[in-house]
Amino acid sequence: MDNIMVHIGRDLYRTLLSNGRHEVIADEPPEFGGTDLGFSPSELLLSSLGACTGITLRMYADRKGWPLEEIKISLSFDYDKAAGKSIIGRNIELTGELDEEQRNRLLQIANACPIHKTLQNPIEINTQLTKL
C-alpha cells in the first residue's frame, strides 16, 4: 500500500508531500494566492497519470523487444460544469521504428496503466479526523 504524508503550515499554500524517502513541494500559482513553489494539485494528478502511462509503455515495449526510443506525453485537465465531469486530455508521442500494429497495441496498453484504471473506475475516499 502506498502512503503519503502531507504537511501545510501558515505559508500560503506551500505544501510538503513525502513518501518517507522523497519530498515534493506542491503550491498554487499566484493568481490563486500561492507562491508557485511547486506543482498545483491538479498538475500532480496529471503527473501521476503521465508517469504511470510512460512507465507502463516503456515496460511493455522493453518486454516485447520493440524499438520504442522515446515517449512524450502531454496532459490537460478541464472541468465541464454543464456535464458535471472532469475531462483529462492525454496525447502520446511515440518515437521509434514501430509499425501500425505495435502503435495500436501501445495505445491499448496506455489505457490499461494502473492510474488510468483507477481514474476510470469509481473511487471511494474515506476521510476521518485524527484525535489529538
Image (spheres, rainbow, N blue to C red):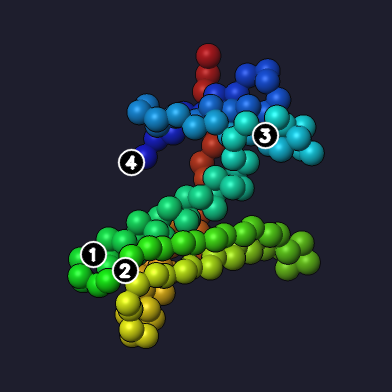
Going from N to C along the chain, the mark reached first, 2 or 1, is 1
Residue 38, percent from left and from top: 59, 35
Q: Is residue 68 above or below residue 47?
A: below
Which residue is found at the position 43% from the left and 53% from the top? 51
Q: Is residue 9 above or below residue 53?
A: above
Which residue is found at the position 64% from the left and 58% from the top? 77
Residue 112, percent from left and from top: 38, 67
**Residue designated by label 3:** 36
**Residue designated by label 1:** 62
Going from N to C along the chain, the mark reached first, 3 or 4, is 4
**Residue designated by label 2:** 68
Going from N to C along the chain, the mark reached first, 2 or 3, is 3
In the picture, measured across the screen, residue 130 lies left or right of residue 51, that is: right
Q: Nearer the viewer, residue 103 or 121?
A: 103
Q: Measure the C-alpha gap from mark 2 to mark 3.
A: 35 Å
Which residue is found at the position 32% from the left and 77% from the top? 97
Label 4 element class: loop
* Residue 98: mark in rendering: none
In the picture, measured across the screen, residue 6 lies left or right of residue 81, that is: left
* Three-letter amino acid code of the residue under disc 1: Asp
Crowd rating for badge 4 (residues with CA inside 10 Å; few <14, some 14–19, many 20+) = few
Residue 106, percent from left and from top: 36, 73
